[in-house]
Image: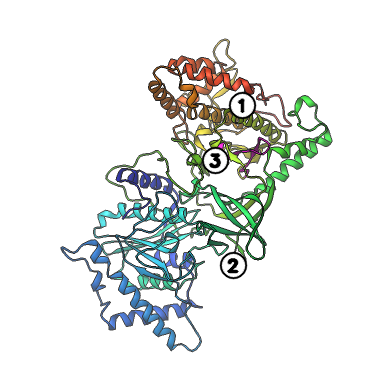
Amino acid sequence: MGTLGADAHGLDDQRAALRASTTGHTVQVPVDTYFSTYQSNILPSARETEELISWVQDGLKKTKTLNTKSWPTTRIRRQVTEDDTYQGLEPIAEEIHGLCLAWNEKQNTIKLPKRTTRLICRPRHETASEVRGGSMKTDARFILMESRDGGGEVDDKKVKTCDVGGPMEAKLDVDDRGTNEDQIVGAVSHILYNDPSRRFVLAFTVEANMMRFWYFSRSHIAVTAEFDYHANPRDFIRFIIFMTFSSLEGLGYDPTVVRVRDDNKDVQYQFTVGDKKYQTVRCIDESSALDIVTRATRVWAVRELDANDQPFGETKVLKDVWLYIDAKSEQTIQKEIFAALEELDKIGVSPEERPPTSVAGATMADDAKQYFMTIVEDIAVQVNDQDDTTLAPPRNAVEFRYTPLPTPPPAKFPTVAGGRHTKDNALGPVGTGGKKASGKPKPVAPSAKNPVVYPHTQRTHRRIVFAEECQSLYTVDDYGDFTLGLAQLVYGLDYMRLAGFIHRDISPGNCLLYMKDRHIKISDLEYARRYDSQCQSALPLTGTPGFMAVEYQALKHHFLEGSGAPGKKYSVRDPNEDEIEAEQQEWFQFNFLHDLESVLWILLSHLLTTVPDCLHAGIEGIVERHTAVLKLYNDLFDGSLTGSAERRDFIWDIKEKRMTGFLKAKRVLAALYDKLLHGSRSYGSICRCRADFSALGPRPLQT
């Protein structure tokens, strides 16, 4: 079956991208470990659960639904279709439910919980979704007994994605295992993306007689070793019982998110943040929530609710995100930056060593606050009075490798269309997009040939409420506002440098323009670190690939002082050459200039992707020029975590102060570049901002 409502080619690309995004994040566990780790007991004790399973198994044998060898209704037969074969799972699940109720009546004290789901096999039915262009078909699915969309019974012919408790995919041939894996990953990705109230998803797959159970969270994916569910029916019975009677929290729903309809009958969400509640007005961005193992950042315009659930006050911004469990909160990092600047204020810093203040006599700490978001709330989400944290893989988990497909999937991420966005370009420019990459290294020297990969680090669920509703630089169309924002961004980064911090994730999505006073705000500080010995290559490789510094992508220092050709202060080091000693090749340290280089990539991306229509007038061969621009963009912003030779060479040209010459050398770009450069001068070139950090700062800078 299919997901994400695309044509055949687009669907294959999306599945290939999802497969790539799950590589390295999936583990395999024994079936009994799966139950003990990812599914709690429905009954008070394991003994009582085993008694219930035995009761159900005996009852199924009495009705001959189950015999000593198989489930007869789902046995594979010649000339019987896939749909007809696995259609028998639905009556089996219903009979298991009936036997559970009969067992429940026999007990004097133990009572099963209220039924929450039922299994339906409707392989040709699509689910209704909120994301534009989105739909989903699965061979079977557990649907809720009571709809999340206003209550009432769920119509099994018109199921909404928010009411899918867990999907199932089936194939008659074990050789289709790889296709089944792609389809179940795609279905779960769609569920998590479509429904902001989902924390994790449980699922199962069948290939011929072999069955596997799945767990999908924002930190890792777990799948059981396959087993023959005909020869070993108890595990299948256990899974059906859990999915039928589990609480909504046990199925992965977030009790602190409520789905509602506004006055226009549009879907909105009410988020609990500490002791307050906020209702969404519109979605600002949720592009990173499409991948499964990710921060899944969603940003909403919201209004606070009173005791009667009525909105009041000005519109604020709520960010819902899954951070590494050991990451500091954005509010904590902000406070540390301001505290460090307060200490510098006490020591005293000359005016030449600090960005120009906009308020006469303001301290650095006070002046720096204009470059950061005003945080109203920053809390860990609570579920059942505990921090909402993803589970850790069990100790006996092993790496899972997805079944190879006949045609290798493409390496690049496709552009994702649709979503609950108010602007079509909220996902970022075509090509690299707003895709983030994040990884923790193995204990070996990282390099371009040996990129860092992070283990299955647990994540904790956080919500932050900001006072200002801003616009990301992805969506700023006015060239004057854009260049002004970049100039201010450099000043904000200068304050971070003075405080001894590096950001490590500067991108258009993290640089926000507050339109009320046309001022930049630096956000997403969870990857920010103090500039010290901890900022070497042992830290996770983080950032949006298209905007990462080339040295950071390679985890090598390409620009080494004193090693250039005559008349050149710096040279580019070829990563394949052995001219540098081994220990130097293995050592890398992120520094302030790498943050600053990201600003340059933001500017270049904007120049290549947002050419005003008025500039086309009078330019001959505009189609050829667009083709050239697109080629240059794809060369420089290829979406690769480890970068490209074109990116490195481009930065080398800038270090040689030949950026203008580089662009003009591509003659088809000259006319457009001249006009854009003229527009930039009208607002002040960012080159005149404090771009040279090397002579400033409380700590030595190594490049």
Whole-percent x and y of residue 357?
A: 76, 31
Q: Which residues are magenta?
A: 508-525
| Residue that appears at 36% across and 67% down | 156
The question of residue 520 being in magenta is answered with: yes
Q: Is residue 149 above or below residue 467?
A: below
Question: Which numbered disc flags the more N-terminal residue, 2 or 3?
Answer: 2
Vertical relation: 131 (above or below) 139: above
Q: Which residue is mark 3?
A: 542
**Placement of the N terminus among the 4 image quadrants:** bottom left
Q: Nearer the viewer, residue 116 or 443?
A: 116
Q: Secondary structure at mark 3?
A: strand
- x, y percentage for residue 362? 81, 35
Depth order, front residue of 319/26: 319
Please tell me whether mark 1 or mark 2 is closer to you in this view: 2
Whether residue 507 is in magenta: the answer is no
Mark-to-mark CA distance, 3 and 1: 19 Å
Q: Secondary structure at mark 1?
A: loop
